[in-house]
Image: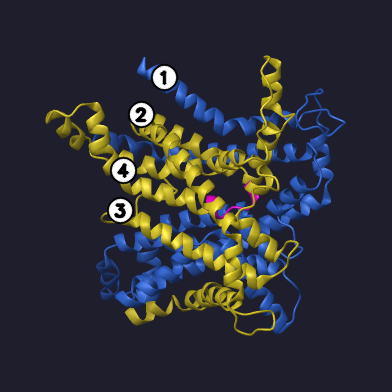
Amino acid sequence: MKNTAYRIYMALVFLFLYAPILVLVVFSFNDTATASRSVWEGFTLRWYQRLFEDRMLLEALRNTIVIAVVAAVVSTVLGTMAAVGINSMKKLPQRIVMNITNLPMVNPDIVTGVSLMLLLVAAVSLFGGRSLGMGSLIAAHITFCLPYVILSVLPKLRQMDPNLYEAAQDLGCPPVKAFFMVVLPEIVPGIVTGMIMAFTLSIDDFVISYFTSGTTQTLPIYIYSMTKKRVSPEINALSTMLFVVVMALLILVNVRSGRTKAPVQKGEERS
Amino acid sequence: MRSKSKLLSAPYTVWMTVFIVVPMVLVVWFAFTDRAGHFTLENLLSVGQYSNVFLRSIWLGAVATAVSLVMGYPLAYGIAKMAPRRQSVMVMLVMLPMWMNFLLRTYSWMTLLEDNGLINSALTAIGLPRVHMINTGGAVVLGMVYNYLPYMILPLYSVLTKIDQSVIEAAQDLGANGRQVFFKVTVPMSMPGMISGITMVFVPAVSTFIISKMLGGGGNLLIGDLIDMQFLGSSYNPNLGSAISLVLMVIILICMGIMNQFDDGEAAGGGVMP
């Protein structure tokens, strides 16, 4: 009895989480002429066709991917270097650097966004150059991705036995080589996690991009302008496609990690 | 060797000085100056006339946080009690909606909540009167809960799975009944997860400007909308906008300080990633 009640509760929560997504998907096939969002008038694929003819959208998509790739790579390299450096700092400087690193994570996105906008606008008026655009977007994205990279690499460095690195050097390995042969393999999982997080955060970001983009469009900004201006099922078609892509990616990742991790998990369960 | 590896963080130190510290200094600078660049307290003083907006944001954010906690705790608790394989599937199901752009999901709630929307059509179909839902405070709270519920469930879940089963058994052996075990052992031990869940829901909820714009209509202005208006909206005034941002930051710091009072020991109670 108690169990049934709980099952119903759980089903309701998941209904709450998935109902809007279901609505978006269903109405992406709606053959409407009146642009009504909630009256079903038959099946069509024309909104999908429109989507692929939308130049602005394709450009926004391209911008989003370029920004996400650049931001993820740069923040991963910079962040990993920073984590190694921070790990070898003394207590006080370490604490100062970490507090500043935490700032963009604690601050509301909107405050980070407007503060970067003030900086970038001031930079443009001081040094000239073009107004806000791809450059400022990439800089902003690197900035909010960096803390996540550092915070996922740092624990791996702390777990590592510092003697390993010194042992390699005692055995005659030059420091740089010792870093790449001994330290790097140990922290690779943290680096990969950080990079994936940076990439997804960058793709999904709206608030900070909104304040630092000028007239350049990224996908979330384009979506925002779509929700504001015209009411068209095109936006539903877009969401459906995005959802399918994300789901496919997640299933792919899970199947792959399921294969490689299966023996380990079994071992864990036994203990 | 130590001094050399310290140098590795130099590029980052420079980057974060330029892109984190300087922008923060700029916010403070703009908040305390007028358009001509002279020192003034006028911006901060005029924030006072928006106190109703601040109160509304904090109130709606707090309600949304409370609803998320009440709604999310049983779910997290239930997932933590499942078999490991089912647990990962359920966690995935909780996270999946977050991977879809939040603007699109919030937009979809407009379709559901409108006066001629799906919920109202369903209500009239079964002979019930229509309910006005869109453009109310309730719709804004719903949007907040919907968008940030996973941020509550995930930290709670990761703390609840780590609770040592033998502690529960010890309480039962000592004669505690189910309810006592839950309120005297499980809930206190999941405190770190509750605190990070509450912070992760409250901070974005109190500073949002999209949810209120889409679901709240014009009558439910929040702090985020005010800031947006000063920077990219109709009433361009970065000085006032900076002052509002500064006050928002202080409010959030105070709230987090209060929250940390409830947390004994380490605050790091599970992040987004389970």
Instruction: Quarter of the image for the C terminus of chain B: give it.
Output: top left
User: On what subunit does the disc labeled 2 rest?
Assistant: B
Q: Along the polypeptide, which appears first: circle 3 or circle 4?
A: 4
Disc 1 marks which residue? Answer: A5
User: On what subunit does the disc labeled 3 rest?
Assistant: B
Q: Residue at x 38, y 40 (%)?
A: B157
- Disc 3 to disc 4, C-alpha distance: 10 Å
The amino acid sitting under disc 2 is: Met
- Disc 4 to disc 1, C-alpha distance: 24 Å
- Disc 3 to disc 2, C-alpha distance: 27 Å
Region rendered in magenta: B205-211
Q: What numbered label is drawn on residue B190?
A: 4
Q: What numbered label is drawn on residue B263?
A: 3
Q: Residue at x 19, y 37 (%)?
A: B167
Closer to viewer: mark 2 or mark 1: 1
Proximity of marks 1 and 3: CB atoms separated by less than 8 Å: no
| SS at badge 2 | loop
Q: Could you classify mark 2 by the number of other residues whose Cα lies within 10 Å: few (under 14), some (14-19), or many (20 or more)?
A: few
